[in-house]
Each structure stands twice: as structure tokens, then as C-alpha cells.
Image (cartoon, grey):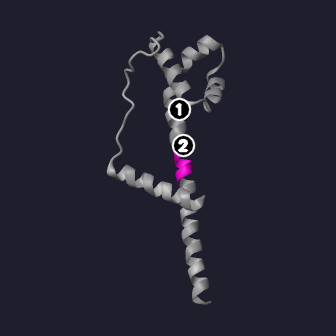
Amino acid sequence: MNEKSQLLIKVASVLDVLAEDHERGVAEKVATERARREEMLSPVLDKLALVTGEDHDSLRNKLAQADPDVLNVLTKVAAEGTITELGGPETRKTASALNHNEKTAAADERFGDWIVS
């Protein structure tokens, strides 16, 4: 094999590793998002089941693909038992700053996404 072929083989193996890492990252994101949604829904499923008359599994399946903002509204309404005034102040803090390791991981992920796309 000549040098050009060896270089192409090395580049292909690097791209394969990036693709595998990307797939692993996507799978982890999906699992994390599913766990977060389950955590959001578990306290309110009883109330939603009572209001809608549907069973927990049916509700869980329907809300699995719901927009996170919709889930936040449902969580607030069902958890508090009352509807807060529209435009009123939010009681939960949602902003979070990324630390150095999280920023680095996000940059690596964006680079991997760019390479794979």
C-alpha cells in the first residue's frame, strides 16, 4: 500500500470512531431526556389520570413525545393544584451556567456532529 492509501485508511478509522462516539452520545441524550420526562411526570400522573380517566401507561406514552414547555405547564398545574396567574413570576430557577468540563464536552460534541453531518 502506498502512503495515500494508508492516510485514507487512518482518516476513515478516525471518522468511524467519531461516528460511534456520536451514536453513543445520541443514545445517552435520549435516555437522559426520557428519565427527565419520567421524573417530571411521575408526581402528576395520578392527577392527570383522575382528570382524563385514562390509565398511567396510556398517559405516559402520550406525553413521552410532548414538548418540554407543555410538560412544565402540566407539572405546575397538577403539582400545585392551582393555576398561577399568567405572566406571574416563576418560582423555579431554570438558568444554569456550564462549567469548564461541560463546555469542553459540548464543543467536542458540536465538532463531532459537524464532522458526521
Is residue 36 visible in the rendered image? The answer is yes
Q: Amino acid at mark 2?
A: Ala
104 vs 42: above or below: below
How would you rate the neighbour count of disc 2 (Cα within 10 Å): few for under 14, some for 14-19, many for 20 or more?
few
Q: How far is the residue under mark 2 from the one under mark 1?
A: 10 Å
Q: Residue at x 33, y 51 (%)?
A: 100
Q: Residue at x 55, y 25 (%)?
A: 70
Residue 63: x and y, percent?
Answer: 61, 27
- Please name the predominant secondary structure of the magenta segment in the image: helix
| First in sequence: mark 2 vs mark 1 | 2
Of 104 and 33, nearer the camera is 104
Is residue 42 visible in the rendered image? The answer is no
15 vs 8: above or below: above
Residue 78: x and y, percent?
Answer: 50, 15
Asked if the stretch drawn in magenta spans residue 84, the answer is no
Circle 2: element type: helix
Which quadrant of the figure has residue 93?
Answer: top left
Of 50 and 73, nearer the camera is 73
Residue where numbered disc 2 is placed: 31
- In the displayed structure, does residue 13 sit left or right of residue 101? right
Circle 1: element type: helix
Which quadrant of the figure has residue 116?
Answer: bottom right
Q: Quadrant of the C terminus?
A: bottom right
7 vs 88: above or below: below
Give the magenta part as a residue range: 25-30
Residue 69: x and y, percent?
Answer: 53, 27
Residue where numbered disc 1 is placed: 37
- In the displayed structure, does residue 52 sit left or right of residue 96? right
